[in-house]
Image (cartoon, rainbow, N blue to C red):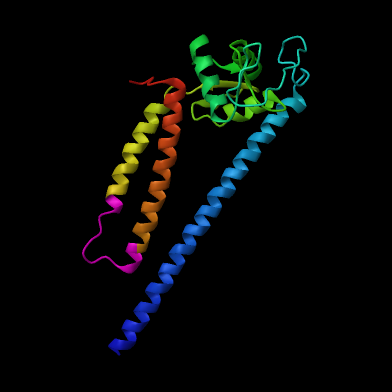
Amino acid sequence: MQAAAAAERGRVERELARLAAREREVAAELAALQATRADLEHQRQVLNHFAYDDEPTGSSGNGGRRLRVLPAAGSTAPDGTTALRGARIRETAVRVLASHTRPDVPVHYRDWFELLTAQGFIPAGKDPLATFLTQVGRSPVVQRTTTSGTYVLDLDFPMRARERLARLARELSEAEELSPSVTVEEIAAARERRAQLDMEMHETERQLEEALRSLGDVDG
C-alpha cells in the first residue's frame, strides 16, 4: 500500500510540474498577446487622430510644410536636423517638453511635435508625426488627457515606481519563505508567484530607468 501511494505521489508531482511549466508558457503567450493588443489599440488611436482631425495630415500647424524623412537614427542632415528612432524619440521629446514648458500643463500633440522639430529633431520614418505619436504613447511618463489629442507629463511616476519596486521586493522575500511542512501544491504556487514578481520587477525597473533618462531625478 505504501509503495502504491509513493508511486501515485510521484505521478502527481510530475503532473504538477508539467502543469506549472504549461502555466508559464500560457502566461508568456498571454503577456505577448496583451502587448500586441495594446500596441494595436494605440495605433488605432493614432490613426483616429488623422482620420478625424480637421487639419490635413502632416501639416503640423505649419502652413502645410512637408517634413523631409531622414533615414537613420542619430544621423544629422546638412541642415543640422537629427533623426531619432525608437525610445530615443520619446525620451528626447519628453526632455524637450519638460525644459521648454510647464511639465504639468497639457499640450496638444501637434504643438509638442512642432516644439521637437524646432529643436532640430525629427522621428525617422515615412510619417514622422505618426511615429512620434506612437512613441510618446509608450512613454511611462506620458499620459493622455480627457481632451482629444492632448498629453501631460506624469512627474510623479518615478516616485510611484520606486514605491512599487520596494513593495515587490517585500512580496518576493515573503514568497521565498517556505514552511518546513510545505506541500507540493504550495511549492508550485510559490514558484509561480516568484516568477510573476520577477517579471513585474523587471518591467518596473525598465520603466523607471526610462523615466529617469527622460525626466531626471524629479522627486529627489
Q: Residue at x 42, y 30 (%)?
A: 209
Q: Is residue 179 magenta?
A: yes
**x%, y% of residue 124?**
65, 25
Front residue (pair 75, 41)? 75
In the depicted view, which residue is nearer to us: 215 or 178?
A: 215
Q: Is residue 196 left or right of residue 120?
A: left
- The count of marks equals 0
Residue 135 percent coordinates (x, y): 59, 29
Q: Residue furthest front?
A: 78
In the foreground, 109 or 80: 80
Q: Residue at x 39, y 52 (%)?
A: 195
Vertically, is 96 above or below 169? above
Q: What quarter of the picture does the N terminus occupy? A: bottom left
Q: In the picture shown, does residue 63 fall above or below 177?
A: above
Q: Residue at x 34, y 87 (%)?
A: 4
- Quadrant assignment, res 193: bottom left
Quarter of the image with the C terminus is: top left
- In this rendering, does residue 101 appear at all? no
Q: Quadrant of residue 79?
A: top right
The furthest residue to the left: 180
- Name the quadrant containing residue 128: top right
Above or below 3: residue 108? above
Residues rendered magenta in the picture: 174-187
Work out whether residue 81 or residue 162 is closer to the camera in this orientation and state it.
Answer: 81
Q: Position of residue 111 (x, y in %)?
A: 63, 14
Please say whether residue 184 is one of the residues in the magenta stretch: yes
Tell me the residue at 49%/30% (across/down).
140
What is the residue that sits farthest to the bottom in this orientation?
1
